[in-house]
Image: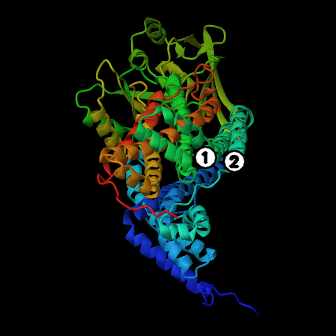
Amino acid sequence: MNRFFVGGRPPTPPGTAYRFALRMARQDALRAKGRTALILSMIGLPVAAIVALAVLWRTGQEPVGGTEGGTGPSAAEGAVTGMAITMILLQVVLLAGPALVVDARRRRRDLALVAASGGTERHLRAVVLASGLLLGGIAAVGGAVLGTVVAATALPILEAVDGEPYGPFRMPWFQVIVTMLLGAGSGVLAALLPAAQAARMDVTAALSGRRDPPGRSRRGWPIAGGVLVLAGVVTALAGVNVLREFGAAFGAAAIIIGLVLASPWIVGTTGRLAPRLALPLRLAVRDGARNRARTAPAVAAITAAVAGITALAIGGASDFRQSQVEYQKKLPMGSTLIRAPRTGADEVERAVRRELPGVPVLPLRTLPGPGEACMNPDAAPCPALSFVARQDPEGLSVLLDKVVGGSREARMLLGRDDPAVTSALDAGKVVLFGAKPTDGATTTARVFVWEDDRQRTVSQVEGLPAVAGGGDPGVSAIIPPRIAERIGLPVRTTAFGVDRADHRVTKAEEARLDKAVKPYNQNMDAVYVERGFTGSFGGIMILLASVAGVLALGGALIATSLATADARPDHATLAAVGARPLTWRVLTMGQAAFVAGLGCWVGIAGGLVPGLSVARPLTSTPEEMGAAEHGTIIDIPWTLLLAVGVLIPLAAALVAGTFTRNRLPMTHRVHS
């Protein structure tokens, strides 16, 4: 058999070649510590986030008793999780890919020496792929460890916030291993492009210091990207009618992938704006447009991240606005309600009076209503009471069901003295809220139990005098004590009220009350103080802006680092013609601002349609009982979007300018 040797030497055994490639990758990683840390962060942090969420979810599914609980994730949760992992994998590849291109460009001479020593294209590819495998593997392991530590640290904090234990700490090994494999695999995927470029490089040009000409752009990609964007817009707008949130999610995925494919064309098109800019910015924009192979992946990564965050921000802000619109007061503003358990009401009352010395505390006694939980395994011994009346179609928010009392209870629940309600109670009439007596003057009390999932009437008391009360006191009825005696059901103390006219509970007092009542009532709403709608979306906005900032800054700085490494001859030319160090600094800042600004604004445009479409299924139907119809609610967080589009490019430019060396490089040109 004939054998063809390169350089007169026999071919290297495959195992030796791969060991050599890993050794070179290790040495290069140790030599370029800053860039290595950046790549490890880009791969390891998403892995850590997924692992931490998986650990917290699995731990939350385990009951305190230690038995296997939960019914597993639903199909919707599985689909959303799969899409999230896919998008994170895309982010890792797009962000880590340009960083590995930096390494490949910086190691061109070393790779050329390998080729000159007899290495084939397969060997050159192996050297670059080994870097992706080594860094991806280390980042995957480190990210899994970091995610586990973060979950273990966050678990007691979440338990303290939620007020209930999550369960024993458990590791979802299958999800963790799959995530680690995805992380390691993403490093290899990110290294495919620089490996292919290394295998095709001109060895003579690399050894002589000349740069390879920029590769030809693929004309089919922008067309495919445009088709995907249009398909995504149609899916996002029309798919919500059938698939609801999934229609918007699939449309968002198609739009983002389409924008990623069209990124080289977008970068090249924006390069036409260069003649209108100042000289350093003109050079930065032209350099990015001319070298799309290193600029487009970073722009695509920023676009994908910002588009997803824009859609989430619009959907989340609209959902938050819906909660604000539909909020209904359960008590008069400033009043307080402390719930008591079925047994231990006396202990709760003592705890409340101890924490609020001198404050009038009103025991609230109730009759069992249809919505009250039955504590017995068999529901038959749990009778419930309902009044035969015409219900208000708008519904009623009920905090307590049927309160037994008089004018004092009515004043506490209504927040004012209502002469009509007071006179009716004094006359021994039942006051109904959210309903009207069937004949205008009387009602029937019906006592029933549940048997075989059906209601069985136990007794009825007819001809009870009743009137309709105005307002929404958070109860369905106030029953005079002598009427309660006629009905014959046991009356028990279910809560204690603090009238706002007597005392307004402060947040510090609320915290002390909650702590004092916790041993007797583990429910989160054991202590309820009516303060109106107090929710806030600011924390989530800050979190989304932070995520967008980290990803955009990372992508912009990676692209800027690659441009700086690739444009050293141009910088040397600037130095030779007398350019000041400030010119180089402004050039670097312009490159970072160009990449970050283009990616952010294209991402904002790409996320608007999915965000607007997902707001329709989220907000078109009222979620709170008794809330009025309001149609689709759309709230676009313009402050967040403007901060992403303006502040992030400025921050990228400032960071790039801060870490740019003042001294221009001096080198020599080698002419062929």
| Callout count | 2
Estimate the spatial distance between the alpha carbons at disc 1 and disc 2, rounded to whole Å.
Answer: 8 Å
Residue under label 1: 264
SS class of the residue under badge 1? helix
Residue 623 screen position, x and y as percent: 59, 29
Left or right: 264 in relation to 649: right
- Compared with 634, 289 (above or below) is below
- Compared with 321, 40 (above or below) is below
As drawn, which residue projects farthest toward the right?
1
Residue under label 2: 221
Residue 58 screen position, x and y as percent: 53, 58
Pick whichever, 82 or 407, lies toward us: 82
Pick whichever, 569 or 512, lies toward us: 569
SS class of the residue under badge 2? helix
Residue 224 screen position, x and y as percent: 72, 45
Q: Which label was assigned to residue 147?
A: none
Q: Amino acid at mark 2?
A: Trp
As drawn, which residue projects farthest toward the bottom?
1
Let me know if residue 354 appears in the view.
Answer: yes
Q: Are marks 1 and 2 in contact (CB under 8 Å)?
A: yes
